[in-house]
Image (spheres, helix red, strand yellow):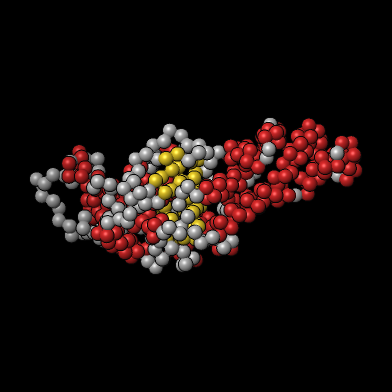
Amino acid sequence: MSPDPADRHQESARHQEGARHLSPARVLDVDPLLEDPQTRIVVCCGSGGVGKTTTAAALGLRAAERGRKVVVLTIDPARRLAQSMGIDSLDNTPRRVKGVDDAAGGELHAMMLDMKRTFDEIVEAHADPDRAAAILGNPFYQSLSAGFAGTQEYMAMEKLGQLRARDDWDLIVVDTPPSRSALDFLDAPKRLGSFLDGKLIRVLLAPAKVGGRAGMKFLNVGMSMMTGVLGKVLGGQFLKDVQTFVAAMDSMFGGFRTRADATYKLLQAPGTAFLVVAAPERDALREAAYFVERLAAEDMPLAGLVLNRVHGSGADRLSAERALAAAENLEDPRIVDQDDGKAGVRNSPGPQDSSDTPEPPAEAPEAPQATDPVEDTPERSVDRLTAGLLRLHAERMHLLAREQRTRDRFTARHPEVAVTEVAALPGDVHDLAGLRDIGARLATSRPELPEPGA
C-alpha cells in the first residue's frame, strides 16, 4: 500500500527544500530505495560510533511501515537495537517487532548475530551427527568459533546468505560490525577461506590422510622446523586438537569458500544497496571516503552517504561575528551601539583622552564602578543572560561552519555520491517513535525538522 498522495507531495516539497541546503551535492532520497521491490538488501557500513545501528533500525522500520517485510540484522553487542524496538533481547533468531504500523501490509523483524551459534549451525547443517559432535566438542574449534580474527565478519556474511536463501523477507537491512579497517565485512570471507584452504591446514591434514605413525613421520620430516616451533609455543596437545579439527572439517572446507563467494556476488548484485554512515567530522568523513573508494573498487553498489548528527540552527542569519559583537556591547555598558564591539572602543577616544569633557554637576552621583551594586539590577542581569546566549549562538555558528567545510571537502572529492543529512538529537533514540522520527529525517534530508507532535 502506497502512502497518501497528498502526504507524498508534502514530503517531496520538504525534500526539495532540503536539496537547496545540500546543493551542490546530489541528494539521497531513501524512500524510492526502500519502496523498490527490486531492493532486497541494504547494508549500512561505516566506522564505529557514527550511528549505523540506529540508521539500520530506522530504515527497517520505515520500510516495514511502507509495506515491506523486513528483517534487520545487527552485529552490535550493545543491544541498543533491542531496546529501541521494545524487545527484551535479540538473538540468532529473527523476532517480530510489535507496535509497527502494519496498515500497508509490512512487517518488521530483528535479530542480533550470535557468532558462535552461527558457526555451530553451519557445522550441524553440513556434517553428519557423529562428525558434527566431534567438531563442536573440539577445543580448537571452540576457540576458532568464539574469537578467531575475522570470524564475526565471516559469520555475518554467512547469516546474510542464510536469510536471503530462506526468502522469508523481501528486504534485509544489515548493520555491519564497527571496524577501523573499513571493509573487514567484505574481506573476512576471503581471509577465512584462505586460512581454511591454506598450506598450514593442508600440512596438518596430511597426517590424518596418511595415517598413524607414518603420517606423523611425514609431518616431522617435511615440516620439522615449523612443528618444532609450534610445539614449543602452543604445545603438543594443541597441535593434536588442530589436527583432529582439520580432519573432521576436511569435507566442509570447500563449502566455506563456495558460500563466501556466493554471498560476495550477492553483495555485488543490483538488488543490494550500500549506505555509508558518517558524522560531519574530519576523521569520520575520511573513513567514509575510504569506504566509498573501496566499494567502487569492489564493484559494490553504493546508494549514498548518510551524514548523521548534523547540527543546524533556525537563527543562522545572525552570524557568529555579529553575535559576539552584540554580546560585548551588552557586557560593557560603555560601548552600547558599537557595531564592532570592543574593537570600536579601542579605536575611539575614551573619557580620559578628552580634554574638554565637562565636569559633572556637584549634585550628580558618582559614576558606578564595576563592583557597584547597581550592576546587579534586573536590567543588567538580563543583559548578562542575553550576552551569554549570544555567545552560545556564536559557538553554534562556528560549529555549523566547521561541519559545512568538512562536508564540502568530502563532496568536492566525491561529487557522484548522493547525501542525506540527519540532525543531531538532544538524546539517544530509545523507542519506535524515535526511530520513526529518524526515518522521516533520513527521507526528507532536513536536519531541522520539528519535534514529533510540535
Give percent across and percent down for residue 379.
Answer: 17, 44
What residue is shown at x 28% (from left), y 47% (from top)? 451
- Name the residue at the left extreme: 363
- As drawn, 21 above or below 449: below
What residue is shown at x 82% (from left), y 42% (from top)? 209
Residue 370 visible in the picture: yes
425 or 444: which is nearer to us? 444
Give percent across and percent down for residue 119.
Answer: 62, 40
Give percent across and percent down for residue 424.
Answer: 37, 49
Give percent across and percent down for residue 317.
Answer: 27, 60
Viewed as shown, does residue 87 lie left or right of 131? left
226 or 331: which is nearer to us? 226
Quadrant where the N terminus sits is bottom left
Viewed as shown, does residue 318 lie left or right of 197? left
Viewed as shown, does residue 212 lie left or right of 423? right
What residue is shown at x 46% (from left), y 67% (from top)? 415
168 or 405: which is nearer to us? 168
- Name the residue at the front extreme: 128
Residue 10 visible in the picture: no
